Amino acid sequence: MKFDSALGLEAHRGPLAIAGKILIYGLMVVVFTGPLVGLLISAFSKTLDPTAFTLWPDEFTLENFIQAGDKNVYLYLFNSFVVVGFGLLLQMLVSVFAAYALARKKFRGMAFVMLIMLATMMLPEEIIAIPLSLVLADMPLLHVNLIGTYAGMILPVGAWGFSILVMTEFMKEVPVELEEAARIDGAGELRIFATIILPLCRPALGVIGVFGFTMIWDQYLLPLIVAPESDMWTLPIALRSLRSDEEVGIGVLLAASLLALLPSIIAFLAFQRQFMRGLTSGAVKG
Amino acid sequence: MTSTLTPARSRSAPPGHRPRSARWRGTLIAWLFLAPALILFLYFKFIPMFVGLWKSLFKVQTFLGDEWVGLQNYQTIITDDEFAAAITHSAVLALGTTIGSLVLGLGFALLIEGPARYLWFVRTAAFLPVVTTMAAVAEVWRIMFHPAESGMLNIILGWVSIDPQPWLASEHSSLWSIMLMSIWRGTPYDMMIFLAGLVGVDRTLYEAAAVDGASTWRRLLHITLPALRPVFWILFTLAAIRGLRVFVEVYVLTNGGPNGSSEVLMTLIYKLGFQKNELGVASAGGIVLFLATLVLTVIVQALRKRQAAS
């Protein structure tokens, strides 16, 4: 007997077994994607009921998305993209720089820095939300107020321990001979970093890119603290305000929710392999 | 390698001097590369942590200036009924979500393990809830939880002749409804990690057990589950910590209601801090949550070590 899995289900090929498998797998797909499919269909339907949700498209319409414009949904979407665009760029730059030092250098205080990285991962951001709002309103030493600015939503996500550690693991794999050869040829530190190490870590950039994207896109408490006025809202925190509207019912809410969901779903589907790789490496290493 | 480099070295600097300056140079470069990350961590993690610790000892007043109150904020938290209820709700929600996701995640992982192409499709589809934006998914569930007969979940219950449930609208079911959604979102994550763990189980052990005539159930119990033990502990710790600090789900679905029946620690802290302007008490609440997380991590680690040793 040969086993490809713990239960050995692949060995059962009778009609009953096949029917059972179709039932189980079908049910799984329906349960986990049903709400999302329902949203997709409802967002393009004329909303009849202000409370319910439809799986049967009534009448295909873009009405909800047009109405969404009047409710500033596209402004919120724009804000979200500004934050995720600059936030991700900053986060990836910070991560590759830090990872280069941690993976390729032996230096005094390295154990201490690793401890700091792990400490930040153990410290959930929710816990520091209240004091963070005080710090953002009056940055120590700099005395700038970041409340109500894009910078207030971008800078706090700039350094992420998970992303740095994943990148560090990848960079350790690059053979040291390549670096030594370049050094003998007289290449400087930045040059070695940019032309030898980084290109070899391209798969890892995909991993931290897709994780960073979903992490920043999903931020809720931070924009809630930073953006008291609606013109700075990101899409996720704006959804609450779109709930009840006498004219359009839940149509705009559905359209906006769909717009808030799609980018991370697309990012996941496009970078699936990198996502799974990061997921297992991150979880197994704690 | 060394022999070819030695002449170049002695030419540029006296022997014994160079290695030391090179080490200093290396350290300097390393710290320069680390500087952006460390500065950002300092400003947005460590300073807020200390500000939180500091402010938790004050009655924070915006215009009047802060007033030192010592441990009074903590005393307020410990004696306050709202806090006690919120801590209970957080713990129930965290434990229920964690156990529910673990059990279902393991079950599904076992069912869809295997190399077949269609299984890959099932896996991808089932994984979607994990990558979705919490706030948007919670809005979708809020609509599905609609308490009237026309609500999506009540329609489904109707198919199997169960009476419509009030879901989020009732004090008795609001917390359980939130838990249901959290399990829906947590299960595929656990499933995926279990799947990665299952790949690592030695296939020859299964074959040997089958040759010895062991049933599927005994194979699971004696080979598969022990092999998954480390994965299980990691998932448990991660999920429990995540569960304790839950905010968005509750904030969007019920905002603590009805009548405080689903108020968790973070929604309460948020309300204290930003709506009632009790920043001192709210900071103290954050510290308490931090300590709870820390204690939980230490306990789980200790249990894990003890089990590994026995």
Image (cartoon, coloured by chain):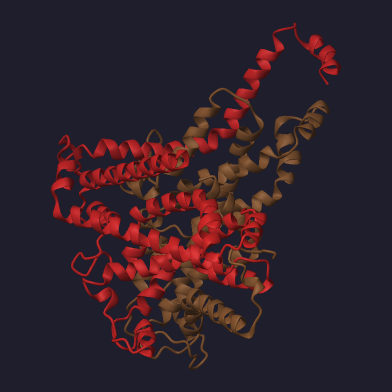
Task: Residue B198: name its quadrant.
Answer: bottom right
State whether residue A97 is above or below residue B274.
Answer: above
Q: What residue is shown at x 50% (from left), y 56% (from top)?
A: A215
Q: What residue is shown at x 65% (from left), y 61% (from top)?
A: B211
Quadrant occupied by the C terminus of chain B: top left
Q: Is B163 or A214 nearer to us in this picture?
A: B163
Residue A213 x %, y %: 55, 57
State whether residue B190 is above or below residue A126.
Answer: below
Q: What residue is shown at x 64% (from left), y 35% (from top)?
A: A103
Judged left or right of residue B31, residue A53 is left
Q: How many marks?
A: 0
On the question of residue A105 being in view, the answer is yes
Judged left or right of residue A199, residue B227 is left
Task: Residue A229: name its quadrant.
Answer: bottom left
**Chain A colour in the picture:** brown
On the question of residue A78 being in view, the answer is no
What is the residue that sits farthest to the front in this orientation?
A: B212
**Chain B colour in the picture:** red
Residue B286 x %, y %: 29, 46
Residue B50 x %, y %: 33, 35
Quadrant occupied by the N terminus of chain B: top right
